Amino acid sequence: MMLGGPLPDRTLEGEALLAGLRRRWKGLGLLWLVLMGVILLRLWTLTVFYGEEYRRQAENNRTRVVTLKPPRGILYDRNGTPLVSNLPSFDVSIVPEDVGEEKEVVARLASILRLDPDDVEERIADLKLRRPYEPVKIKENADWRDVTRIEARRIDLPGVVVEVENRRRYLYDVLGAHLVGYIGKVTPEQLKEDLYKGFPREIQVGQYGIERSFDRFLVGQPGEKLIEVNAAGREIRLLGRREPTPGDDLQLTLDLNVQRAAEDALGDRPGAVVALDLPSGEVLAMVSRPAFNPNDFSAGISGSRWSRLRDHGGFPMTNRAIQNAFPPGSTFKIAMAAAGLESGVITPETAVTCTGAIRFGNRDFRCWKAGGHGRVSLHRAIVESCDVYFYELGRKLGVDRIAETAKALSLGRQTGIPLPSERGGLIPTAEWKKRARGQPWYPGETLSVAIGQGYVLTTPIQLATMSAVVGNGGEWRRPSVVRAVRLHADWTFRSLEEAERVTSEVKPETLAFIREGLRGVVHEPGGTGRAARVEGLDIGGKTGTAQVVTLRDRREARETRFRDHAWFVAVAPVANPRIAVAVLVEHGGHGGSAAAPAARKVIEAYLAPKNNPPPPGGAS
Amino acid sequence: MTVDRRFIEHFDWVLLLSVLLISAAGVLTIYSASATPYGPQPTLYLRQIYWIGAGLVVMLAAASIDLNTLKRLGPVFYAAAVILLLSVLVMGRVGMGARRWVQAGPVSFQPSEFAKVFLIFWLASHLADRPSASGLRLRDLARPAALLAVPFLLVLKQPDLGTAAILFFVAATMFVAAGVRLKPVLALAAAAGAAFFFMWPVLWGSLKEYQRQRILVYLAPESDPLGMGYHISQSKIAIGSGGFWGKGYLAGTQGHLAFLPERHTDFIFAVFVEEWGFLGAIALVGLFVFFVVWSAEIAYRARHRFDTLLAAGVTALFAWYTLVNLGMTMGLTPVVGVPLPFMSYGGSSVVAGLAAVGILMNVRLRRFRIFG
């Protein structure tokens, strides 16, 4: 190796070159220092100037608020039999923020759960109101085998969480479905209600029936826990916890035994049954057919199932007991008789000769019995349901006086039963027609009203209530569906605020007379409701047949959809009524044959129970 | 090679101490970054210590080699660099979407880390041999620039945007230090600008999707906080949340709960600042500034043009690495993936870095030789 020697650096020229090199190098160094100054400035801004903000973001990063869902209150029937339970079930959810490669994770999860990946994507994209890091439910009530598969592949499924949920189980399936109702995810509209203020999007709340109307007791108050999570969203430790408040339990007015009897009596026929306890006005049974299974909703109803229900021609989601208003037919003669007696237009002794028809204006109004009933008193007119008697009475009364009494018997407006979407029905007056139709009232229309046709519309619950007014002798209570609430706080049953007590303007003597008529309908020879008769029970009732098409067309129309609606209203025992029933069988034909036997079975189940309440699960 | 009294006497203990302090901070932070069940293996810090040990041996060797010999071997180093980079292309192992590693016996290493140092050797010797009192002309620049284009493109091919950028900056720094006439530089800049403008669509099209994303995200990181902007956002949150005092050692949440990606390598500074705060960061950045200034001083005081250019090249390497990495973790520069010298985990970068420190020491030692 050669040391020393003449190197260019040692020459004068070399020294000059080196000096230039050093000068430029110094300049570059200063430039770097300036740039590092910018770095330090940035460091200061990030840590000190915006430090608080970033610290908050770091906290948000690592902590999550997880909702603790409160168990819903349990529903019992009036005898203490539970109607629902809260079963633990596994729900699979996704926290989109934690997922990362969304397409792949969704595809894997969908294959494990046997779902369509597009549906899963849709669910994730759907929730615009979701708070950040709030899980999106992908499958409710997942199979435990699916859950173990998911747990085994946790590494491949970031952001997928399995939560244990209390799933609402309706022990008797369709039994009392319309009364009990169902639950479902809280809707954006509901979140604006006071009751659900601040509720998380995933919580299930009452959507129908008692579950909805009494949700203020049932839903409870959600709690939350604050957890620390890692970047994959997995819980690391618990930072804080506020327990949820469970919902309060409710004792319903429903009698499982009576409800079962009513369901069986109606069978598969479309229609409704309402049974009220007397004198309390408590709903013992409420059936609407066709029905739905509320369990389908609490598990998160599938799209296909929902469209099947929605497109079902029979409207299974409609509670016919309070939402379907039809002409009451001859059951309206109860109101007619009361109106006649109250107004003094007739006395119980007033008699009319029925020749099978009456001519009014230029039209014949026929009695249902073509040959006529001959000379009938008011009592016999009720028993035999003589149309001509009531045509005559209607003509004398005029529509407004009929309406006055009908309303006093609770018809023509909502009964106030605490369930959503009750319809009011219609009791026409001259003033109503002027207002609604812009036409004067024609006297001939009064004759139609007199036999419960024409404009008159009543719901099953209204007719049941009318029967209750008659049965109670004037005093009545608005129908109620809940007897008592067991507050979670102290585990004691408290009676709910009592339903409003109403005193009808109709005199007790009038109602007593009508009750005798109703008893005659069932028990006397020639009574139209003899099908309701049963050994040992003092049943009174009234049949009704509501025309779907006019008498003239009926002969041509034999199809089911043109057949008459069959009504039967009843009270029992007549001497001291304890139950009022209204039965509607849509397109069932005659009230006496189609509806009366159903009413009888309901009354029997309440007054003369043969067996104990049915075991859970064996619903009809 | 002679280990004599002067070697001990004039050994640059200060430079070594500053490097060891930075390395110690690195080991501590790697321990913290991997001390969680959700991260890389928890024993990474031990391996980093082994690498530092190996690097120190290489450093001593590099400090003792005769610089004149090295200077003469300039073209050999160039060839070695190109061969190293070609080996990646031929037998490289793919990791994280790029082909950067080569398996050599039991260890795999990143040849580009060593190629950078080799190229500095070559460029220093090349420029030292072609002195020009009034500065390099465009003609003088053409040859080294063309030669540099080969390794540059090889690195881009891997692809390793970060190393390519560093290579460019270091070469540019050495050119400027060696002296360049203003006119050709301006002409070159204008030509590059025009070429960039017209070639942009082609260039954009040739980029890999993730490279395009990185550029877009750099321009607007908040546009995609959970996607590609994630790195930058999380890094800024980690640094910012450290505040003035820091959260305390092993108490960082961004790092420990795995929100921060690449936290033991490229984003290790963010982990450090989250735990040690502005105060700790000032100390660390201060160490880096001290180290770079001390190295620059070695270059400045060197008595030969080759020595100065060599030390300047090595200093520029560390200076640009530090600047680009810190800028990246704080969202000032695009996420190009360059390590922070002596802090980031990585055997190749530690060993190559310490070898470069050895060269600085070597240059300094020559000042104290009577002949040299």
Image (cartoon, rainbow, N blue to C red):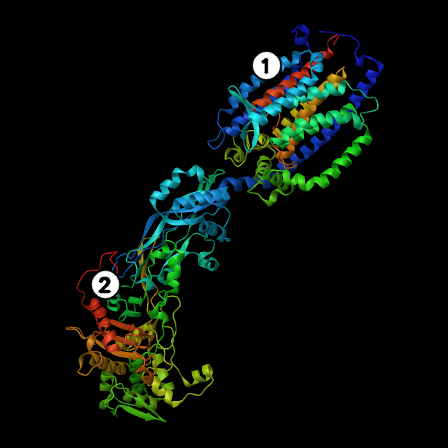
Q: Does residue A56 appear left or right of residue A402 in this picture?
A: right
Quadrant including the C terminus of chain B: top right
State the image quarter where residue A286 is shown.
bottom left
**Nearer to us in this view, B264 or B215:** B215
Q: Compared to A56, does A589 lie above or below?
A: below
Give the number of the disc on residue B57: 1
State the image quarter where residue A415 is shown.
bottom left
Label 1: few (<14), some (14–19) or many (≥20) C-alpha neighbours in 10 Å = some
Q: Position of residue B46 (x, y in %)?
A: 51, 21
Give the number of the disc on residue A351: none
Same chain for mark 2 and mark 1? The answer is no
Q: Compared to A367, does B240 lie above or below?
A: above
Tell me, yes or no, if residue A557 can be seen here.
Answer: yes
Task: Determine which residue is flagged by label 2.
Answer: A257
Tag 2: residue type? Asn
Q: Residue at x 66, y 11 (%)?
A: B64
Tag 1: residue type? Val
Q: Compared to A561, does A150 lie above or below?
A: above
Label 2: few (<14), some (14–19) or many (≥20) C-alpha neighbours in 10 Å = many
Quadrant including the N terminus of chain B: top right
Q: Position of residue A126 (x, y in %)?
A: 49, 53
Q: Does residue B313 appear left or right of residue B136 in this picture?
A: left
Q: Residue at x 71, y 14 (%)?
A: B72
**Nearer to us in this view, B86 or B158:** B86
Q: Position of residue B33 (x, y in %)?
A: 53, 29
Q: Secondary structure at mark 1?
A: helix
